[in-house]
Image (spheres, grey):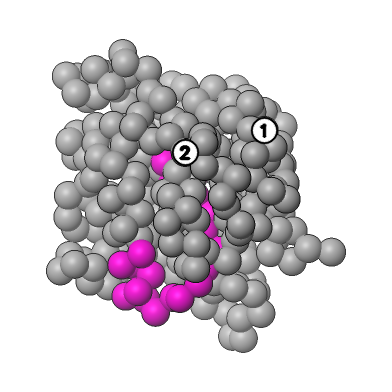
């Protein structure tokens, strides 16, 4: 999988380019403490669109420091799009990645052909106890996150793997991600979004519950909502086929 330099730092990303591509390119943005691996099913299973899933700086195989504001990640993502020569894309973001996608749709609307908001919200307040744990006892914070992140039907091995992967993220990067989430708030601006939008949420999501996705659907003109029965916050890992079906329907409506 390829690398590109963004502001002098190596960025790793998963990529699939069909020939010919009949749909706009899709860029997947992972959430706090995540990596491109959260999107591998979707990168692979959209046969008519070029797909990209970068590791944000300081995450996975990408160099650099993490950020502590969604808007700073948004500016970084625009530079990534420039480096891979993508003028306009469908942005699909999970949790903090959804916040980054919303940020681009508001500040760089000319770059956003469509918007997929997965397990996210217009405001992403973080429990003070979790922020404190991430700052003082990162291992405890990771245990809390992964304990909340999966629905009751998810295999325990999936949660264990997620915990191991999150433990590989530098504690300062992980803390910065959740500070970025806690500071994010575009509740009053959703009516400004003009890109076609779909929201998706697992019915057992305890971190960004269904009411968050319903609010996005109700406040963004023309937005649709898909609920995935039994899935938790990591819906694209727990039920990847359901997420891919929803994305295909959004990209190629009847």
Point out which mark residue 214 bears. 1
Residue 216 located within the stretch drawn in magenta: no
Classify residue 78 by image quadrant. bottom left
Disc tally is: 2
Label 1 sits on a secondary structure element that is helix
3D distance between C-alphas at marks 1 and 2: 15 Å
Q: Please tell me whether residue 235 is drawn above or below residue 130 in the rendered image.
A: below
Residue sticking out furthest to the bottom: 20
Category of crowding for the residue at label 1, using alpha-carbon neighbours closer than 10 angstroms: few (below 14), some (14–19), many (at least 20): some
Residue that badge 2 annotates: 186
- Quarter the C terminus occupies: bottom right
Q: Determine the residue positioned at 31% across, 26% down.
A: 142
Quarter of the image containing the N terminus? bottom left
Q: Residue furthest right?
A: 254
User: x and y percent of residue 10 in the render?
Assistant: 21, 66
Q: Residue at x 24, y 24 (%)?
A: 134
User: Residue, x 19% and y 34% (percent of image)?
Assistant: 171
* Residue range (magenta): 78-97
Instruction: Answer whether residue 194 is visible to the viewer in this image.
Output: yes
Is residue 181 shown above or below 74?
Answer: above
Where is residue 219 drawn, in percent x and y? Answer: 65, 39
Residue 170: percent from the left, percent from the top? 19, 39
């Amino acid at each position: 999988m390829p690398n590109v330099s963004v502001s002098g730092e190596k960025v790793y990303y998963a990529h699939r380019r069909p020939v010919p591509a009949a749909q706009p390119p899709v860029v997947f943005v992972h959430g706090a403490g995540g990596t491109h691996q959260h999107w591998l099913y979707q990168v692979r299973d959209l046969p008519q669109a070029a797909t990209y899933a970068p590791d944000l700086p300081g995450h996975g195989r990408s160099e650099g420091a993490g950020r502590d504001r969604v808007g700073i990640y948004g500016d970084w993502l625009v530079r990534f799009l420039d480096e891979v020569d993508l003028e306009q894309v469908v942005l699909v973001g999970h949790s903090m990645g959804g916040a980054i996608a919303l940020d681009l749709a508001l500040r760089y609307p000319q770059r956003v052909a469509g918007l997929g908001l997965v397990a996210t919200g217009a405001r992403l307040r973080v429990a003070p106890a979790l922020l404190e744990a991430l700052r003082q006892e990162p291992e405890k914070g990771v245990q809390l996150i992964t304990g909340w992140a999966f629905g009751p039907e998810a295999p325990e091995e999936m949660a264990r793997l997620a915990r191991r992967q999150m433990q590989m993220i530098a504690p300062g990067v992980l803390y910065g991600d959740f500070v970025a989430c806690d500071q994010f708030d575009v509740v009053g601006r959703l009516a400004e979004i003009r890109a076609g939008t779909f929201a998706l949420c697992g019915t057992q999501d305890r971190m960004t519950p269904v009411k968050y996705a319903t609010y996005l659907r109700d406040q963004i003109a023309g937005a649709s909502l898909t609920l995935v029965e039994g899935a938790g916050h990591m819906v694209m890992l727990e039920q990847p086929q359901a997420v891919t079906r929803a994305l295909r329907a959004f990209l190629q409506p009847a």
